[in-house]
Amino acid sequence: MAGTDLTQDAFKRMDEGEDRLFYEVPRLVTHIDEGAIAALTSCFKDHLPASGDILDLMSSCVSHYPDDVEFASVTGLGMNRVELDANPRLTTRVIHDLNHDPILPFDDGTFDACTLSVSVQYLTRPSAVFTELARVLKPGAPCIISYSNRCFPTKAVAVWQALDDHGHGELIAQYFAGSKEFAPARVLDLSPARGRTRVHRDPLYVVVADAALPL
C-alpha cells in the first residue's frame, strides 16, 4: 500500500477552535442509518470477546454492541458527559479530549478489545493515539475502527476529506502500521446491499487489526 503523506498540514481542520466547545452540546442521535448499524453490530458480535473488558473509544450515547452478548465491562471514553450517561452499555465513563491529550488514562494491557465507531476522522494526532491503543490492549486483542461517508466537515481533518472511501480504509491501515504495534490491518466493506431499490443507504467499512503478540 502506498502511504499517504501525513505532514502536519494533513491534520488541519476548517474549525481549529477548541473541541470541548464544539462537543459541549449533546447530540443524542446515531450517525449512520439502520442498515449500517445492523452491519456494525454483526461485526462486533463476530469480533468482540464475550465476557471481555471492552474500550469504546470516542464513545457517545450508543455503542452498537449486540444486545445478546454480555461483557465484563465496557469503558466509554468521550467528550460529552450527557451522551455517555445516556449510553446503557457503558459500565465506566471517562471524559477525555484525545486531540488535546492523546495519552489514554488506563494501565497497560487493560482491555480485551477496542472499538472506535465513525469518529476516527476527527483525530488530529492519530499516531500517538494508535500507539496508546496498542499499549492499553492485551496482546492479540482486536481493535475495530469503523467509518461511513458522514462527518462534521468543519472538524474532520484535511487528509480525510481529500480521500474517498477506499482511501479512508488505507489511511486507517496506515495509522495501525505506523504504530508498529499491530498485526497487518484488514479492511472490510460491510455496506448493506441496495437490492433493486434506489434508496440511499449509508456505506459501512471496518478496519480491524490485532495488537501485536510479544516476540
Image (cartoon, rainbow, N blue to C red):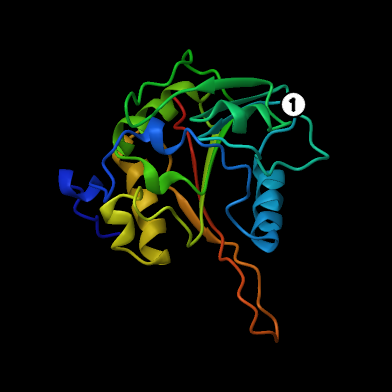
* Residue occupying the far right of the picture: 68
Relative to 36, 12 lies left or right: left
Relative to 22, 60 lies left or right: right
The amino acid type, in three-letter code, at marker 1 is Ser
User: In the displayed structure, would residue 125 be above or below residue 208?
Assistant: above
Q: Position of residue 158 (x, y in %)?
A: 26, 54
Q: Position of residue 91 (x, y in %)?
A: 69, 21
Q: Nearer the viewer, residue 154 or 64?
A: 154
Q: Position of residue 131 (x, y in %)?
A: 35, 29
Q: Which residue is mark 1?
A: 51
Residue 96 falls in image quadrant: top left
User: In the displayed structure, would residue 84 be above or below residue 159?
Assistant: above
Q: Is residue 157 visible?
A: yes
Label 1's element?
A: loop
Q: Residue at x 24, y 55 (%)?
A: 3
Residue 70 falls in image quadrant: top right
User: In the displayed structure, would residue 163 be above or below residue 100?
Assistant: below
Q: Nearer the viewer, residue 24 or 195?
A: 24
Q: Residue at x 54, y 20 (%)?
A: 94
Q: Residue at x 45, y 55 (%)?
A: 151
How many numbered callouts? 1
Relative to 196, 155 lies left or right: left
Relative to 72, 201 lies left or right: left
Q: Quadrant of the N terminus?
A: bottom left
* Residue occupying the far bottom of the picture: 196
Q: Residue at x 37, y 35 (%)?
A: 19
Residue 122 falls in image quadrant: top left
